[in-house]
Image (cartoon, helix red, strand yellow):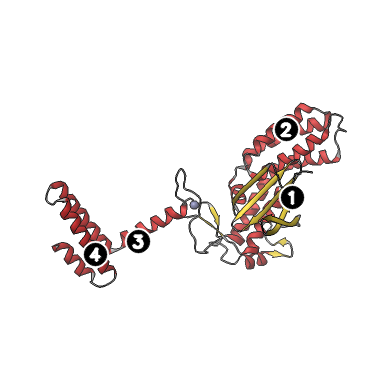
Amino acid sequence: MWYAKMYFSEKRECFQYDAFGTQGAPSVCREFPFLESLLTFLEMDCEELTPALQRIADCWSQLISGGNRQAGTDAMVELGQLKIRHIYLELLYVRWYDRFSRMGIYHDHGSTEDQQMLEELRRLPEQLLLYQKQVQRFFDLVLDVDSAGREPQQQAAMNYLYDIPKDPDLFRFHPIPLNFEPVEPGRCSPVLYSASILDMIDYSLRSCVERGITVRRCKNCGRYFPQTGRISAEYCERPVARDQQTCREAGAFKQWTKKQSDDPVFKAYRKEYKKRFAWIRAGRISDTDFYAWSEQAREMKKKCDRDVITLEEFQEWLKHS
Ligand SMILES: [Zn+2]
């Protein structure tokens, strides 16, 4: 029997899928930073998926009502393309592949299971859009540190009456199928065995609340990131496009340059340095003299940074050195 597993491990999330149910050797095994799947789901253009989902539903309908095997194959090809778009969509492929491969040639057309799967496909485009809105609302009211504060537990408790959200647009939790098993050497963890995308979203949101993890929009790239470390973190750790640097490193550098340019001691030093550097070109000073001077100037700057001399004294020295 097929399965789709999802679990969290510290700052990571793991997905395992297998159409044949081979435990220990899944056909798909992917790892992401914690919450990345939910965040990319939130950013996904779901309306763009609708035509493909409709075509798959139509093919499935032809397969189960008239035994059109080719339509079944077409549905699988489309599902195969769709699953590349998001890790949640891999679930559809695995489930439909399992069902299709069990049908055989003398399939009794239109069983209840097949009919239910068809209805699921038909409803999915609308549901994905709804889940996105509900997740966004949950971020605004519960998880976003800038709009909801630092206490997801308190915010969640405030926003629900038993299992009913007080705001009708807020995400609705429901029972999810959790197991418990070893997930890596020496460690057991709850594992979600699910047949629905909704369960994966549900598990991600409740895990944030349970672990007290807030989210924030990154000051560099503008995307949400989970604050798995410091609550004051302002940058995510995703790599900046086509760069080895992460947003956090780029942000730290920006902060440093800003701090430096606001610093009067650094400014005074920088101005004099530039002036004298230009003198080399003009032939007013030799390389050696310049480097000797800059070494002295750095020493003086250090003294000034440590308040051994005042800014005025440093400026005087720069002028007459
Ligand atoms: Zn970022």
Tell me if I can see residue 169 in this picture: no
- Mark 4 or mark 2, which is nearer the start of the sequence? 2
Instruction: Check disc 2 and report its element: helix, strand or loop.
Output: helix
Q: Position of residue 79 (x, y in %)?
A: 69, 36
Could you tell me how far apart the alpha carbons at marks 1 and 2 are, in whole angstroms? 22 Å
Look at label 1 and name its amino acid: Ser
Return the x and y of residue 209 as percentages of the image width and height. 64, 62
In depth, the one of 295 and 269 nearer the eye is 295
- Local packing at callout 1 (Cα closer than 10 Å; few below 14, some 14-19, many 20+) is some
> Please, what is the three-letter code of the amino acid marked with disc 3?
Lys
Disc 1 is placed on an element classified as loop
Examine the image and state in which quarter residue 167 appears: bottom right
Q: Quadrant of the N terminus?
A: top right
- Label 1: which residue? 194
* Numbered mark located on residue 259 in the image: 3
* Front label number (4 vs 3): 4
Report the Cα–Cα distance between label 2 and label 4: 72 Å
Residue 300 drawn at (x, y percent): 22, 66
Look at label 4 and name its amino acid.
Glu
Which residue is farthest bottom?
Answer: 308
Task: Give the side of residue 220 with respect to residue 38, left or right.
Answer: left
Badge 3 element: helix
Residue 94 falls left or right of residue 225: right
